[in-house]
Image (cartoon, grey):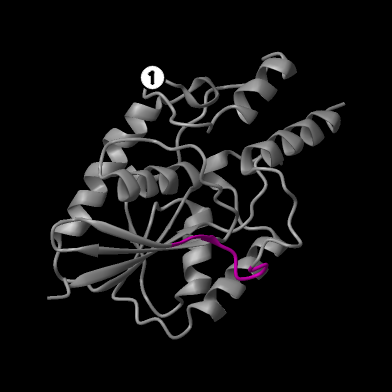
Amino acid sequence: MTPARRRLYLMRHAQVRYFDGVHPHDVVLTDAGRAQAHAAADALRDVPFDRVITSGLARTLETASIVAPGIEPEHRAALREIESGDIRGVDPGVVQEMMTAAFRGIVPFETRFLGGEMIGTLLDRVLPELDRLLADESWDVVLLVLHGAVNRAILSRALTGERAFLGGFEQSPGCINVLDVDTEGRFVVRGVNHTPYDPVHAAGPRMTTMEHLWREYLDARSRIP
């Protein structure tokens, strides 16, 4: 007998800029980010979402409002992005190593993201929230609009069935991951990092998200008088 499965569409918010003088909690989508969100909306236009869940941060709310405009999003603060430390005043070479090595291989739980929150602490808040969602039988199809590290935590759980953090997943801005889950909490991963605005990643750079963040950081530093 074929097991009953529900579906999760797991998105990363669309493009923002983190070093334009705005706190990371408050950044909003760029023009390119809004175009990415509209591309995702077009790709998902026929999907009947029962619920839409965001972290409550502006960039996830704005993305969700474009992708699923007819559904009031729910906010789950535990699903906010991993918290970085204060890198102001840190030697640029050290910052580069922190950024470009942040998500490699199987990341140890004690690893701190840019000197801030530990990977284990991220998992301790994200995975129970995921378990609560799976325990709720009131939905069949859900859209989650979240963040790069949070998505990696969920994808790692889906693939391993365990508390783990696999750093090799790229999560491009506005990407869509597709996961099915059965009544026993066992996942089938159907799609990872699909970008409707560039389906085969032909136009995009071959940098990772963190490498791109490093470029943004350098550009921001160069504008400081």
Q: As rendered, which of 165 and 59 lies closer to the eye?
A: 165
Residue occupying the point 87% across, 26% down? 225
Does dot 1 land on a helix, a strand or a loop?
A: loop
Q: Which residue is mark 1?
A: 110
**Placement of the N terminus among the 4 image quadrants:** bottom left
Where residue 215 sits in the image (x, y, percent)?
76, 37
Where residue 189 sits in the image (x, y, percent)?
37, 59
Where residue 141 sits in the image (x, y, percent)?
30, 73
Magenta range is 191-199
Does any portion of residue 19 appear in the rendered image?
no
In the image, is 50 to the left or to the right of 64? left
Q: Amino acid at mark 1?
A: Glu
Q: As rendered, which of 209 and 87 lies closer to the eye?
A: 209
**Picture mark count:** 1
Residue occupying the point 68% across, 58% down? 30
Residue occupying the point 30% across, 69% down? 7
